[in-house]
Image (cartoon, helix red, strand yellow):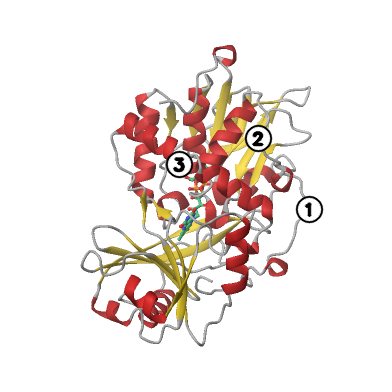
Amino acid sequence: MTMIKKNKQSDGKRVVIVGGGIIGCLTALYLHRLGAQVTILEKGQAGQEASWAGAGILCPIHPWLYPDSFSHLVDASLSLYPGMHEMLMEMSHTSIQWRKSGLLIPLFEDDRIEHRQQALAWSKRFHWQVEELDAAQCKAHEPCLNDQVAGGLLWPDVRQVRNPRLLQAVKQALETCGVMIREQAEVVAVQQSSSGHINAVSLANGERVEADAVLLAAGSWSGELASQIDLTLPIQPVKGQIVLLKDQPGTVNHIIKHDDAYLVPRSDGHILVGASMEYVGFQRGTTDTVVEQLLDATYKIAPGLKKAKIIQQWMGFRPGSPDGLPYLGPVDGHPGLWVASGHYRNGVVLAPGTADIISRWIMGEKPKIDMSDFRIQRPCFQHDSLGFPARQIMAAS
Ligand SMILES: Cc1cc2nc3c(=O)[nH]c(=O)nc-3n(C[C@H](O)[C@H](O)[C@H](O)COP(=O)(O)OP(=O)(O)OC[C@H]3O[C@@H](n4cnc5c(N)ncnc54)[C@H](O)[C@@H]3O)c2cc1C
């Protein structure tokens, strides 16, 4: 593994990570490689929340709606995927199914969202290879598409991973190198010394866990914890439901994104259909209405999928910040406290980038890219001004 070298001078820094999702677990692994003494505290089972539920598309949905700083972070993170993949393979012997399947946005006459110009301009600016397809080329690439398709945009290099396997690989790697994940360990408070330095967390069972640094990586729940030390971290859960279909392998070849749904084909014939965007707090469970909406949208994109078997449905809570950008870095006024949370729809895309930047930063190495748009105490923008969906139950856009 060549990606991260152990830094002997930093040996022994005790870092407690609150939250065992992809962000907490991967950052723990990177911190360990830098010589920190890491403990992950997880209130339930590690890797069972948003990070397990996600679709694993390694490209943000509509990145052109975000500020440029976000695209720079995305590029930095995706550039670390090959090294992370190699490391996980070596340490866990688990394939995360990191593979190139391309992303296709088919265009129809009655599209609700107009992408073409913005998408092309963004791709050119950020050097993402994109091809404009006519109707016939679209059907040739993806025969499952509705005959009404008028054309499309294809990003051939977009990749995907299979989330549960990613989490399994990271957890196995942590075990291999002896990093402790304490499950059923709910953090209820962050504690500070008389000088104001964060020096411990308290668990629901009354136990105190001492630390030189505490990283808040509790996904959708990070805001609740932050409020206990009067820190405003306006992260709220954005529920997403997914339906899993099964057809012959090769029925769908690319990730297909259209107005109200996306399809993510796995190599074994499973097809994920996602995902709703619901502001319903922490209400768990799937609902017939949303499942029907997702299936209707699927059959509009690819009518032939009506014959695919419906296998399963699930949901997860995306940690949504008001502007869709993650909060990353140290907390002003609370030395020793760090945040890596609020990754919204992009936590898997941004996981290696977050883990790399935050682990180095905690160990004393400042980021090489401008992180000011991701600072914790930044002003709050509204979703709507950036073209985000209105705060109501709706399928993916
Ligand atoms: C349906 C859906 C589809 C998605 N698709 C994609 C996609 O295609 N690509 C992509 O990049 N992203 C996608 N995402 C977003 C991505 O999954 C998230 O951004 C990412 O998983 C967030 O990771 P996390 O570790 O911050 O949060 P989580 O995975 O939610 O982990 C947070 C952990 O913290 C724990 N915790 C909370 N409070 C406490 C506490 N007090 N004490 C101890 N532990 C605590 C929780 O139990 C949880 O395990 C999707 C999300 C969903 C729901």
Q: Is residue 106 visible?
A: no
Q: Residue 313: image x %, image y %? A: 35, 65
For disc 3, the marked residue is 81
Q: Residue at x 47, y 83 (%)?
A: 108
Q: Secondary structure at mark 2?
A: strand
Q: CA gap, disc 3 to disc 2? A: 24 Å
Q: Are marks 1 and 3 in contact (CB under 8 Å)?
A: no
* Badge 1 amino acid: Pro
For disc 2, the marked residue is 338
Q: Describe residue 23's horizontal placement relative to residue 249 as left or right.
A: right
Farthest-out residue, left: 248
- Whether ligand 1 has any atom under 8 Å from the Cβ at mark 2 is answered as no
Q: Given this view, does label 3 or label 2 mark the residue nearer the observer?
A: 3
Q: CA gap, disc 1 to disc 3? A: 31 Å
Q: Could you tell which of marks 3 and 2 lies nearer the N-terminus?
A: 3
- Residue 231: which quarter of the image? top right
Q: Secondary structure at mark 1?
A: loop
Q: Secondary structure at mark 3?
A: helix
- Residue 189: which quarter of the image? top right
The image shows a total of numbered marks equal to 3
Q: Residue at x 43, y 31 (%)?
A: 181
Q: Residue 320: image x %, image y %? A: 60, 57
Q: Residue at x 64, y 52 (%)?
A: 70
Q: Could you tell which of marks 1 and 3 lies nearer the N-terminus?
A: 3
For disc 1, the marked residue is 379
**Which image quarter is the C terminus in?**
bottom right
